[in-house]
Image (tube, helix red, strand yellow):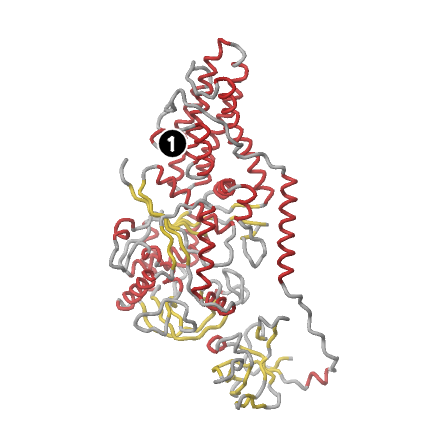
Amino acid sequence: MENKKFYITTPIYYPSDKLHIGNTYTTVAADALARFKRLTGYDVMFLTGTDEHGQKIQRIAEKNGVTPKEYVDKIVASIKELWKTMNISYDKFIRTTDDYHEKAVQYIFKKLYEKGDIYKGYYEGWYCTPCESFFTETQLKDGKCPDCGRDVEWTKEEAYFFRLSKYQDRLLKYIEEHPEFIQPESRKNEMINNFLKPGLEDLCVSRTSFTWGVPVEFDPKHVVYVWIDALANYITALGYGSEDDTLYNKYWPADVHLVGKDIIRFHTIIWPIMLMALDLPLPKQVFGHGWLLVDGGKMSKSKGNVVDPVVLTEHFGVDAVRYYLLREIPFGQDGQFTNEMFIKRINSDLANDLGNLVSRTLTMIEKYFDGEILRGEAGEFDEDLKTLAKVTPAKVEDLMNQYRISDAMDEIWRLISRANKYIDETMPWVLAKEENTKHRLKEVLYNLAETIRFITVLLQSFMPETAEKIKNQFNFIDLTWDSVKDFGCLKEGTKVKRGDLLFPRIDVEKKLEELEKLNKKEDNKKEENKEEKKMEPIKSEITIDDFSKIDLRVARVVECEKIEGADKLLKLKVDLGGELRQVVSGIAKHFKPEELIGKNVILVANLKPVKLRGVDSYGMILAASTSDKEKLVLATVDGDIETGAQVK
């Protein structure tokens, strides 16, 4: 078989304490494609990994009293364990903290700078820490991040910029000339109409407000912005920018970047422009798949609708989870998840269709012919079954080449259904009653066993554990791709041996009740771990006259620095609309000086001046804190308003 090459990647995952079933889909889908390509004779490179730098990681680590590396090491170990549980056959796992990756990122950044495609400037704008993304005022949605809906921060700092705008027309031309580059079609239209045609702004590609990242080699106070760092992994994992680029020369360009539709713009705009600027080939395709939706919405920890894949595998088995993920998300669309839908799929597709076919066939071979597969006399209905079995592998291959995984599984299940129908048509139990029809019975059971061998070959890529169990029960020897080019390769005389049921039927109501109890137990556990929150007692009543004595003003922070020797205190200069005030505030444990510059805060402007640690303070900044004092939020005003405006 020709030595063909196939390079597939997933996004590198951001280390969070738990990946949900929606994250898991991308990797399971990539695994099915990688396994199928290996089966059909390809030399495969399957890459996944973790994206470990950024301000969010640094903040979480600081809060937990560990270094960022210590924090991500623990999370990465759990991600690798999940991929092991889900039978993910990746060839390489990259971490953006790997030494070789960091050196290559520095090389890439410097190369782009020397070419003039990266330049130094000054960034001032809105930044979403969880998404590691910058946004203009018009891009915000109701004043919040348009991607995740969380609060954004005003950021003002020196930064390097990448000339995205320079390559805008070139990228648009490339996409128009290579219609297969962005798939499905709806994603391509979205990128062209929503981003490229309106015009690209140059991209901020470095930060100075935190240190957890790859330092810019020639200007180490800057760290490389996460998307340059993260996106480069697809070539640095292959040795680009290192002394040994053998894998890069062998596998690049990638055949497909498989990504969720929420991050497709980074992979179809920033990433190809980076490659153009580096004079490197673009990936052959970026495929933006849909989401697995719970309660009609994308899974999100903040919404509380995540589904734990580990819990599902413990209750239903790994292959049941893999099957549902791969079957339930149609080509380019969103899928739905509920526990009830999931269990009913297991009962109908896995227990009734596949499980019954395997079990009934094994039982009859053991009962009628002492477990031996024999050849007999051909008859009615045979050709229909054989014809479908012979054409199914080619149909599955064609669909998998288009990344239509769900449709490919539909074809496999069409063959499973046809085999079950064949049992009903030929009625083996009737053939077994008469001695003169037993020769016909042998052929019927042979055809069923051979069809199941075809099904087993095809299932290897999607449900590897199940395929292995069927193989062992039927004692199949040849499960190669070449073996399903013709019907009748199963050796006569093969002995079978029944094992446990592949997928026992599940009592839907009982299992749903069990899962509900498990969820309640988990919720109770979370509640027990929380300290009881009590509202601070409300102070004694005051009159409107008392309140009118307080002068609250909108003030913009223009300068901010730590006070030497004081862990909790920051010294700020605020603009009250032409008047500059110096204010000392005990918020240093919650905010870094650079994070506050540019923020509009509420100032008690007529508070009697005081001296704190020898520094004069003329007012007080208002903030709210949680009962455990762990979180502090500054009081601000909603919408644009001039500095110095009175708050009433």
**Figure disc tally:** 1
Identify the residue position indicated by label 1 in the image. 479
Residue at image location 26% in from the left, 49% down from the top: 250
225, 367: nearer the viewer:
367
Q: Secondary structure at mark 1?
A: loop
For residue 514, what is the image quadrant? top right
Q: Position of residue 612 (x, y in %)?
A: 55, 88
Q: Is residue 51 above or below residue 247?
A: below
Q: Is residue 323 above or below residue 186?
A: above
Q: Is residue 78 above or below residue 371?
A: below
For residue 375, what is the image quadrant? top left
Label 1 environment density (alpha carbons within 10 Å; few <14, some 14–19, many ≥20): some
Is residue 135 visible from the viewing direction of this image? no
Report the quarter where the N terminus lies.
top left
Q: Position of residue 271 (x, y in %)?
A: 36, 58
Residue at image location 32% in from the left, 60% down from the top: 100
Describe residue 102's horizontal placement relative to residue 606 as left or right.
left
Q: Position of residue 349 (x, y in %)?
A: 53, 34
108, 500: nearer the viewer:
500
Report the quarter where the C terminus lies.
bottom right
Q: Amino acid at mark 1?
A: Leu
Describe residue 69's horizontal placement relative to residue 283 as left or right.
right
Q: Is residue 356 above or below residue 309?
A: above
79, 404: nearer the viewer:
79
Q: Position of residue 97 (x, y in %)?
A: 38, 62
Is residue 641 visible from the viewing direction of this image? yes
Looking at this view, name the residue that lies furthest to the top.
Answer: 436
